[in-house]
Image: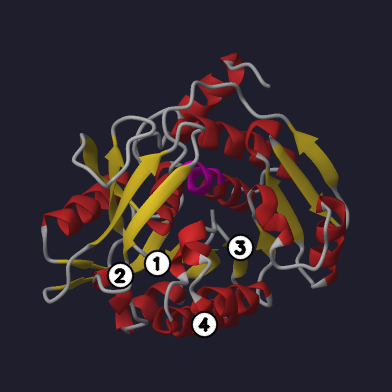
């Protein structure tokens, strides 16, 4: 595999409500802290699959920060562009699950170390090696971060990197004007768009998935990878169009499943696999990630994915 897979954004800890229906307005049992954050989970999964993967981020000089950094190192991630800020705490996300399985989040991002992410000399050095740059919508939580992300994209593009973008929208963030502006900017640089469910309609004026895909391809996006949860995945480009079913699993926690999917797809493409084979691995990575609690706890290597694909049923 030539070149590095790089992402940029929040490294945080996930702290999970133990039971479905449990809220945060009264004391309750919590699980964690688990190392997490969409960009961190993405880069850990890519590294576990053998990619040269790195992340540009910032954590606090606290137990949460070192928990995350140590986990990323263990998975083989290049953390040379992760800054440790002694004056800020590491970002966090408290997650609860509704009875229907939907999730609610309480984030501490803007006023955490993640809010201090910047393109410094270490980040520039990493981007100089970048063959693929992956953007997560969750990371576009302030004007400062959006400005730094623009710098990263321009540096990556100057080196010929492919840009993938997962809008990864949390409803708690849709009220942030900066995020809406950031989404529009990032789409202008995107080669591979990887939305989940109704997110595919968000950057378009379309009212149907088919019309949205046509509009997205018309913007110059080369590939649309539409993650449809239990309905599998749909792939569309100007030359290819196909659907793949989802794998059947007992879901424990969907946090991080889409990030693992993205990482497996990107890694497999850089390994020269066909899009269909790459998406088969991506489906498997996402399914296994959702089978364990904690965004990074279901990250697996190719050998494990191969065993799962050989034996798992599809929906």
The part of the chain drawn in magenta is 256-261
Circles 3, 4 touching at the beta carbon (< 8 Å): no
Binning the other alpha carbons within 10 Å of mark 3 as few (below 14), some (14 to 19) or many (20 upward) gives many
Give left or right: position of 68 versus 76: left
Report x, y in % for residue 92. 27, 57
Q: Name the residue under label 4.
A: 150
Task: Say if the magenta span includes residue 243.
Answer: no
Toward the front, the furthest residue is 25
Q: How far apart are marks 3 and 2 (CA)?
A: 21 Å
**Quick one: SS at disc 4?**
helix
Quarter-of-image position of residue 78: bottom left
Circles 2, 1 touching at the beta carbon (< 8 Å): yes
Compared with 289, 56 (above or below) is: below
Magenta portion: prevailing SS class: helix
**Quick one: SS at disc 1?**
loop
Q: Closer to the N terminus: mark 2 or mark 1?
A: 1
Q: Mark 2 points at which residue?
A: 114
Q: 43 or 207: nearer the eye?
A: 207
Q: Distance between the residues labelled 2 and 1?
A: 7 Å
Which is in the foreground here, disc 4 or disc 2?
Answer: 2
Binning the other alpha carbons within 10 Å of mark 1 as few (below 14), some (14 to 19) or many (20 upward) gives many
Binning the other alpha carbons within 10 Å of mark 2 as few (below 14), some (14 to 19) or many (20 upward) gives many
Instruction: Specify the label residue 9 is tagged with.
Output: 1
Report x, y in % for residue 250. 49, 21
Q: Name the residue under label 3.
A: 164
Q: Distance between the residues labelled 3 and 1?
A: 14 Å
Q: Closer to the N terminus: mark 3 or mark 4?
A: 4
């Amino acid at each position: 595999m030539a070149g590095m897979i790089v992402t940029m954004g929040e490294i945080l800890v996930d702290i999970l409500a133990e039971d479905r229906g449990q809220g945060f307005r009264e004391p309750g049992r919590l699980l964690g802290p688990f190392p997490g954050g969409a960009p961190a989970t993405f880069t850990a999964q890519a590294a576990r699959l053998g990619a040269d993967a790195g992340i540009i981020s910032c954590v606090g000089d606290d137990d949460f920060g070192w928990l995350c950094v140590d986990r990323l190192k263990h998975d083989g991630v290049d953390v040379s562009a992760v800054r440790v800020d002694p004056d800020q705490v590491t970002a966090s996300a408290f997650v609860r699950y509704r009875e229907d399985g939907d999730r609610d989040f309480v984030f501490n991002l803007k006023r955490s170390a993640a809010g201090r992410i910047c393109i410094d000399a270490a980040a520039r050095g990493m981007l100089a090696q970048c063959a693929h740059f992956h953007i997560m919508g969750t990371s576009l939580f302030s004007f400062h971060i959006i400005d730094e992300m623009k710098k990263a994209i321009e540096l990556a593009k100057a080196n010929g990197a492919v840009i993938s973008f997962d809008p990864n929208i949390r409803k708690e963030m849709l009220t942030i004007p900066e995020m809406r502006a950031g989404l529009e900017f990032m789409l202008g640089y995107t080669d591979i768009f990887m939305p989940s469910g109704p997110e595919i309609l968000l950057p378009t004026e379309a009212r149907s998935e088919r019309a949205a895909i046509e509009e997205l391809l018309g913007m110059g996006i080369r590939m649309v990878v539409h993650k449809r949860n239990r309905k599998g995945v749909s792939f569309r480009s100007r030359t290819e169009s196909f659907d793949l079913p989802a794998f059947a699993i007992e879901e424990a926690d969907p946090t991080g499943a889409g990030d693992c999917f993205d990482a497996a797809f990107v890694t497999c493409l850089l390994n020269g696999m066909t899009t269909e084979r790459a998406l088969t691995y991506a489906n498997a990575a996402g399914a296994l990630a959702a089978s364990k609690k904690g965004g990074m706890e279901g990250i697996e290597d190719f050998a494990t994915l191969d065993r799962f694909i050989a034996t798992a049923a599809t929906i």
